[in-house]
Amino acid sequence: HDVSPQRSVDIASRTPPYHKLVKKLEEVRRVLGSSRQLTLAEKILYSHLDKPEESLLSNTNNGRDIWGKANLKLKPDRVAMQDASAQMALLQFMSCGLPSTAVPASIHCDHMIVGEKGADTDLPRSITGNKEVFDFLESAGKKYGIEFWPPGAGIIHQSVLENYSAPGLMMLGTDSHTPNAGGLGAIAIGVGGADAVDALVDAPWELKAPKILGVRLEGELSGWASPKDVILSLVGQLTVRGGTGYIIEYFGPGVQSLSCTGMGTICNMGAEVGATTSIFPFSPAHVPYLEATHRGPIAQAASKIASSPMQRNLLRADPEADYDKVITINLSTLEPHINGPFTPDLSTPLSKFKSVVEEKDWPRTFGAGLIGSCTNSSYEDMTRSEELVKQASAAGLSPKVEFFITPGSEQIRATLERDNTLSTFSSAGGIVLANACGPCIGQWKRTDEVKKGEDNAILTSYNRNFPGRNDGNRKTMNFLASPELITAMTYSGSTTFNPITDSIPTPSGTPFKFSPPKGSYLPSAGFADGNPDFQPTPGVPDPNVEVIVDPNSTRLALLDPFPEFPNSELTSLRVLYKVKGQCTTDTISAAGPWLKYKGHLPNISENTLIGAVNADTDEVNVAYDVDGTKSSIPELAKRWKEQGLEWLVVAEHNYGEGSAREHAALQPRYLGGRVILAKSFARIHETNLKKQGIVPLTFANEADYDLLNACDEVATRGLLDVLRSGGKGEVELAVKKDGDEKVIKTTHTLSEDQCAFVLAGSALNVLAVNARE
Ligand code: F3S
């Protein structure tokens, strides 16, 4: 790998529009009254409102009760996309017909790279296997002026922290761990492709105003405790749903002792409690980090704002700011934690872990220790781990289990190579994987003896540990911990080993005990840039570039706009399927092997509803046509689409719960779905349906679910009026049955904007018209 000279970066496009934001904040204060005390998260969020007055007063009692009520229409500064989700985001953006994106954006190729033998073998193989997708993303990036980071350049969240995040910035990212950027004082929110397109075409992006949860940090970390342990313990307290509807805002004296990258780790895993995002205030640690990553002028501009004599400036919370609730964590007494298995909120302090392992009969040994990833591959993390490896090597010890290291970016990899950290790991037997997600997202070709379905344990410094997430084996227990704790534990290979209290026998017979790890926050010689091939393409649009989509591709297909709503009621809908019980986004659009078709709507639609239980027969994915012909759900939907028959699905409670997967709305729409009639909806999915032009209706009387069966013919009454009046009125469904007609009353939550989406065929069609005007 070559080490290139220090590169210059486009500071202008990376600096938040501070002047504009400060002015907007003044406007916000005028609307809410100057005595109103605001949290930092509120300041950054509200200063990105398109029209502060309209948003802050919407649905509220004169702006007094914004949280959970106001519909915020926001104008983010930037968008980042990873390779898997960027495909549909870009296909949707392309159908708007704009020459370039309205805000700076970046694409990061990280999710489709397999980890197996090491970067040098794995990377070329993954590039060949995914060439058409990478070629598409690169050509689209060049055409529309989106910075394209090629495979091997790094993991989205690490690259964003090193290049784009900045105090006061607001950005969207098409990945759930986008909040990682909050470690550098940004509001960064994970969204689906259709939401990213809002920002890319300069349409306001809508968010229900989150509540603010304050986390006050006191004291100072020392010894084995690390930033990872702050969030591992907090996830244990809050549980996986405890942060839903909240932004987590950190404050207090303890913030001053944390590194910028450590704050990134903490914000990254805020996604594990379901929080909208997490944020740290501008802190002294941000200045050297911005300088070391070629962004000195941003550090200066932010320092100027943060030190302004006005206590109420943009980059800090007002002195009396109110939080919905406050949790206090004392860093001085914080213990290392280990979380898992199978859920990130099962949190155990290290001192109790041995007894819990014994009590629960979890495996006493583990097969691999994996450190790094987007969550924990900072210079600080890696040098602290390196120091432990050096201690153990000096005592003549080697890791007892496989030890994998994933650098988060080429910059950090090249720096660690220059400073001999990587050679310390390799000489101890560690395997350095590509700068990509690899094992963190199931792209791990595990080569040890463990068989599928066999109970076993691994330790990772990643962020998620759901069953099957890393190696595809649902029995693999993934325990989450800090990289330094994992590094030390690989030398014993035992889950019950506590490096703070226990020793390991050395070849000479004397017991060896680790001393607490020491590392460096930043490299004293600065960061190395690494392989110049891993630099991004410039963010300048080139209209002469042709976007590469092979018409015969099985993985990519250009999108045709969905047809407009007819000039009439829907008079001959048919019930495609009556779903019994739970119907998650995974039931509607399964993941796993289907992920490779994310950019090909016709092909991925072959999985539509394949997990759904037939309420009439209890069969899964078995549907019946009017004449009794039996087929799979997607087969029947395709047949009806060919016949020009539009359809509806009938379902029970919380339809569309789970991840915010937009394909779960796109696919039914593509196959001819017009209405989903359910007992209730998961909120995000309900919004996604409306964005794709499907009308979600809720039974006014739940018992009416029993009145409907598959293949019933249904006509809407009042729907056209509701859509034309911007959401006023109710919709009834008339069901023809055995020569009889039954009327089902429904309710809906269609707003004025959403009615426009349905009438136009989709939100994208509205955006495309607006963009052309
Ligand atoms: Fe996500 Fe892990 Fe990659 S959290 S961005 S899959 S490293």
Image: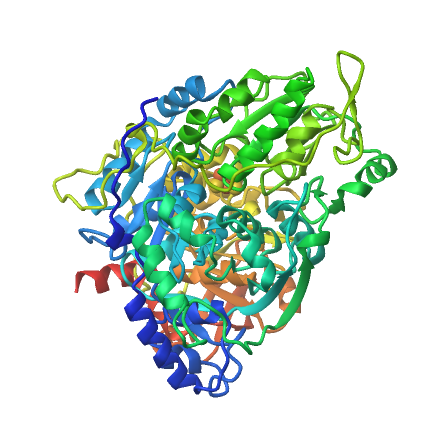
**Furthest residue in direction top, as rendered:** 508
Residue 90, x across and y down, in percent: 31, 46
Give the answer, above or below, for where 653 lies relative to 604: below
Image coordinates of residue 174 in percent, x first then y, are 42, 49
For image coordinates 28% across by 69% down, the residue present is 19
Q: Residue at x 38, y 20 (%)?
A: 124
**Count of numbered circles on the image:** 0
- State the quadrant of the C terminus: bottom left
Closer to us: 288 or 313: 288
Q: Give the image location of residue 237, x and y in percent.
A: 71, 57
The residue lying toward the viewer, choosing from 196 and 608, is 196
**Most distant residue in the left direction:** 544
- Whether residue 330 is visible to the viewer of this picture, yes or no, is yes
In the picture, residue 217 is in which quadrant? bottom right
Look at 43% across and 67% down and name the residue there.
Answer: 315
How was the colour assigned to the protein in this rendering? rainbow
| Looking at the image, residue 390 lies above or below residue 379 | above
Q: Position of residue 409 (x, y in %)?
A: 42, 35
- Toward the right, the furthest residue is 359
Q: Is residue 3 toward the left or the right of residue 183 in the image?
A: left
The residue under the point 70% across, 44% down is 336
Write down the quadrant of residue 29 in the picture: bottom left
Residue 636 appears left or right of 269: left
The N terminus: image quadrant: top left
With respect to residue 5, does 610 lie above or below? Answer: below
Question: Within the image, what quadrant is residue 135 found in?
Answer: top left
Residue 569, can we see it? Answer: no
Foreground pick, 675 / 211: 211
Camera-nearest residue between 56 and 350: 350
Q: Is residue 212 left or right of residue 356?
A: left
